[in-house]
Amino acid sequence: MPLKIVAGNWKMNLLFHEAEALIREVIEKSPDNENAPLNIFAVPFPYLNLAQNLTQGTKNFAAAAQNCSSFKSGAYTGEVSASMLASLNIKYCLVGHSERRTIFKENADELVAKMNLLLENHIIPIWCCGESLNERKQNKQFDVIQHQMNTEVFTLTQDLFEKVVIAYEPVWAIGTGLSATAEQAQEIHSFIRKSISKKYSDDTANKTSILYGGSCNVDNSKELFSLKDVDGGLIGGASLKSDSFVKIISTMYELL
């Protein structure tokens, strides 16, 4: 059975004192026992040590980076390596978020390099995939996602792939207030799981956590988390306020 996960992606938001208060409030107010989902704070680089320290020792909380370098080390000013993240005891890192793909033009080769470096450093990649609005309108979403999987995450050996978390995020729904319908979300998540089964095995597919990202919020989280092949969410704006993020976490907890 896949691990159930609720991950908050803060993007480039919040000041240090706001970050500290938010993490403390979410941990204090959320279910915290063996039956609760794994809850992840994907925070900006300057807050990683803070997030790691505040979540260390909790049962159901962890810190994640939003990105890492595709280079191992060296003269790459401004970059942060996977080994640096590991030295902070960070266990998760986003890879291939649509904003990294579109704004920063990250390509498949870079994303594969990042995943391999993360895995070498015992950090779990949360690999993101999804289609644009134009691709959805042209009914190309399955081709787009299959291509992303084939050229990126499917380059991993089966044992390495089984460590990866997948997040499906329809690009047209990120930050727009739009969200995939339950039918659309289930259709894509089922497609991803079947693709994993064909590439590796049914057992691997059934163990892989596949999260939904794209304007997942308090109002739609229960419907989305109730879907057969949705194992949690990658939450954007709703993770920036403790009340809304806690409600989403509690929704998943109630469904377990």
Image (cartoon, rainbow, N blue to C red):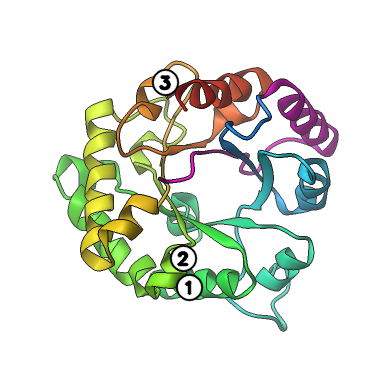
Q: How many marks?
A: 3
* Image side of residue 232 versus residue 121, left or right: left
The magenta-colored residue range is 1-30
Q: Residue furthest bottom?
A: 74
Which is nearer the N-term, disc 1 or disc 3? Answer: 1
Marking on residue 235: none
Image position of 239 with respect to 161: above or below: above
Percent x, y of residue 12: 65, 43
Is residue 185 among the parts visible in the rendering? yes
Crowding at mark 3 (Cα within 10 Å: few <14, some 14-19, many 20+): many
At a point 14% along the width and 45% down the height, the residue shown is 138
Mark 2, residue position? 106
Mark 3, residue position? 222
Camera-side residue: 33 or 148? 33
Mark 2 or 3, closer to the camera:
3
Label 1 residue SS: helix
**Residue 98 lies in the magenta-colored region:** no
At a point 60% along the width and 25% down the height, the residue shown is 245
Camera-side residue: 185 or 62? 62
Label 3 residue SS: helix
Say whether marks 2 and 1 touch (CB < 8 Å).
Answer: yes
Three-letter code, disc 1: Glu
Mark 1, residue position? 110
Determine the image quadrant of residue 196.
bottom left
